[in-house]
Every structure is written in C-alpha cells, then in structure tokens.
Image (tube, rainbow, N blue to C red):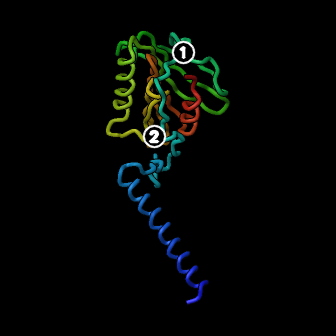
Amino acid sequence: MNRRSKRSRWLIIGAAAVVIAIAVLLFVGYSSGNSPQAPSSTASSNDSTSSSTYSPYTPASASPTPPTATDLQGYIPAEFDGYTWDPSDDDPTAMEAGAVTASSGTFQSDDQALLANLAEWSSVEEAAAFAQQRGEDENPGQTPLVDGDINSGAGHYWYYALDDQTGMIYWYFGTFTGQLRGDPQSVQEFFLGFPR
C-alpha cells in the first residue's frame, strides 16, 4: 500500500472517531438532563389566536426586583406607549376580596381599547393569591397558554386566550395586581412593556 492511501485511511478513521466522540458527548449531556430546551408552543397549530410573544426562558437573578411604585396611583401610568389611562370606577371584585384600593378602566390608543382592572394589596401573598384565583375563576376549565415570573420572582403572570380571540392576562407584581383584556397581540405587547 502506498503512503498516500495509508494517510487517507488514517484521516477517515480519525474523522470517524471525532464524530463518534461528539455523538457520545451529546448523548451523555442529554441523558444527564443538560439538554437545551426548545421553546414551548403557546398555541396549537389550529388555534386561530395570536401566538404568545412571551419568552419561555426566565433569566436567573440574584434576587427579585420589586416594583418602585409605593401606591396604586403611582403604579398606573397616565400615558404609556401610545395608550392613555381612562379610569371608570373601582374594581368591585378586588375591593370585596380585601384590596387596599382598586381601579377599573381602559388603556385607550387611537385604534385599541384594553380593559383593565388594577389593585393594591396589603401583602404580596394576598396579591399573588388574588391574581391567580381571578384568572382561574374567569377562565373555568382552561389552562393558561403561558405563565411565568416577573422580574425573577417579584411577581407572576398568567395569559389566557378566549374563544372570541380575546387575550386576557392576570398578574401580580409586589403588592399590585392587574388584569388586562383585549386584542391578543395588543395585550401581550402592552404587558411586556408595562412599567415595572
């Protein structure tokens, strides 16, 4: 056998060994639970509602970052991202459940109206329990399409899509709770940018 064919044979054997080593490393990494997680789908392929824009990944943080607002009036922006807050009344559901203060109204833009209920609570635990329970009560038998932490654990949100292609999101952030209802894409975009 000539020198060139021996060299080619060793190159092929070396390349095969590298491929096998990579395959073994990937297999060992996946079987030990270190596999990368694919983003989960937030809507089925036959679901006509807008898919969620929420990231399925919540980055780790040393500690949760609480809201900077000290009361409900400071938490609700009068104007935000082309929307103007138009309060209409107290939120009776939140007030009956023990909220310190609560407000219902509409975040209105030139072409969208997002209905909102916002409240302040005495404790984070009360806020968390109310937001989650309200979502469950107003969407019986449904599972949120997506939910996740806000500011690494300072709050949490639950997003539902209704049959009439309306998006609903419920959240608590520190001692504040919120509910937003409207066009699914508008609800998601508004919430993602909502001051925190």
Image quarter in which the N terminus is found? bottom right
Residues at marks 2 and 1 touching, judged by CB atoms closer than 8 Å: no
Image quarter in which the C terminus is found? top right
Q: Position of residue 19 (x, y in %)?
A: 49, 67
Residue placed most toward the observer, 132 or 90: 132
Q: Amino acid at mark 2?
A: Ala
Image point (54%, 13%), residue name: 69
Residue placed most toward the observer, 14 or 157: 14
Structural crowding at the residue carrying mark 2, measured as other residues with C-alpha within 10 Å and reported as few (<14), some (14–19) or many (≥20): many
Q: Count the marks: how many?
A: 2
Label of residue 161 in the image: 2
Q: Position of residue 31 (x, y in %)?
A: 35, 54
Image point (51%, 18%), residue name: 67
Image point (63%, 23%), residue name: 80
Where is 25 relative to 158, above or below?
below
- In the picture of the structure, the residue carrying the numbered disc 1 is 68
Residue placed most toward the observer, 191 or 125: 125
Q: Amino acid at mark 1?
A: Thr
Q: Position of residue 71 (x, y in %)?
A: 51, 10
Q: Position of residue 123 (x, y in %)?
A: 38, 13
Where residue 11 sits, quadrant-wise, is bottom right
In the rendered image, the residue lying farthest to the left is: 141
Q: Give the mark toward the camera: 2 or 1.
A: 1
